[in-house]
Image (cartoon, helix red, strand yellow):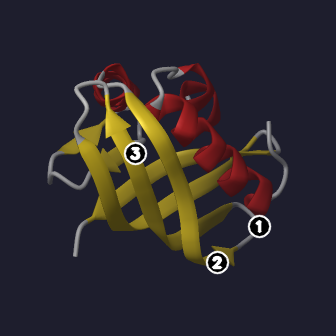
């Protein structure tokens, strides 16, 4: 687990790359176990609650992707118990079906300290 906000953000994007490649386990481990988590993805749907959020990420993971997800232009805001990261997510690569993907997406990730560890509670992305 992570004890700094920067380490939590690094773990989020490392796990995000694994998720895109088909392995959701690292992504599941960094999210809060609480049922107040949420995800608003670039397609516009909102998922609330641990079960719904993880089911959506499992669907995304199953699509299969060969490429990279990197964070750019990031800014952190942190208090003792909460923090967030605002950034650009830059993705490029290929789907299993051979479709080329390249996208730049604005993202906000909210992270909460739980039992001394930073855990993701919300992720919002949108295309611009």
Residue 119 seen in this snapshot: no
Q: In this rendering, is residue 19 above or below 45?
A: above
Query: What secondary structure is marked by label 3?
Result: strand
Q: Are marks 2 and 3 in contact (CB under 8 Å)?
A: no
CA distance for labels 3 and 1: 37 Å
* Residue nearest the observer in this picture, 30 or 25: 25
Residue at the spot 34% in from the left edge and 32% down from the top edge:
53
Residue plotted at (40% across, 28% down) = 50
Residue 5 horizontal side relative to residue 98, left or right: right
- Residue on which disc 2 sits: 77
Quarter the N terminus occupies: top right
Residue found 76% across the figure and 67% down from its top:
80
Q: Which mark is residue 93?
A: 3
Rendered residue at 41%/40% (across/down)? 36
Q: Is residue 52 visible?
A: yes
Residue situated furthest front in the rendering:
98
Name the quarter where the C terminus is drawn.
bottom left
Mark positioned earlier in the residue sequence (3 or 1): 1
Query: Alpha-carbon neighbours of circle 3 within 10 Å: few (<14), some, or many (≥20)?
Result: some
Pointer 1: what residue? Answer: 80
Category of crowding for the residue at label 1, using alpha-carbon neighbours closer than 10 angstroms: few (below 14), some (14–19), many (at least 20): few
Question: Which SS class for mark 2?
Answer: strand
Q: CA distance from mark 2 to mark 1?
A: 11 Å
Name the one closer to the observer, 52 or 9.
9
Q: Which mark is in front, 2 or 1? A: 2
* Relative to 54, residue 79 above or below: below
């Amino acid at each position: 687990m992570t004890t700094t906000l920067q380490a939590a953000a690094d773990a989020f994007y490392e796990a995000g790359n694994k998720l895109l490649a088909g392995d959701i386990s690292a992504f599941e481990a960094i999210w809060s176990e609480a049922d107040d988590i949420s995800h608003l993805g670039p397609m516009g749907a909102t998922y609330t609650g641990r079960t719904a959020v993880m089911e959506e990420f499992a669907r995304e993971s199953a699509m299969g992707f060969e490429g990279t997800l990197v964070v750019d232009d990031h800014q952190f805001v942190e208090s003792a118990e909460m923090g967030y990261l605002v950034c650009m997510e830059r993705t490029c690569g290929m789907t299993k079906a051979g479709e080329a993907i390249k996208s730049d997406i604005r993202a906000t990730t909210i992270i909460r300290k739980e039992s001394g560890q930073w855990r993701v509670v919300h992720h919002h992305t949108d295309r611009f």
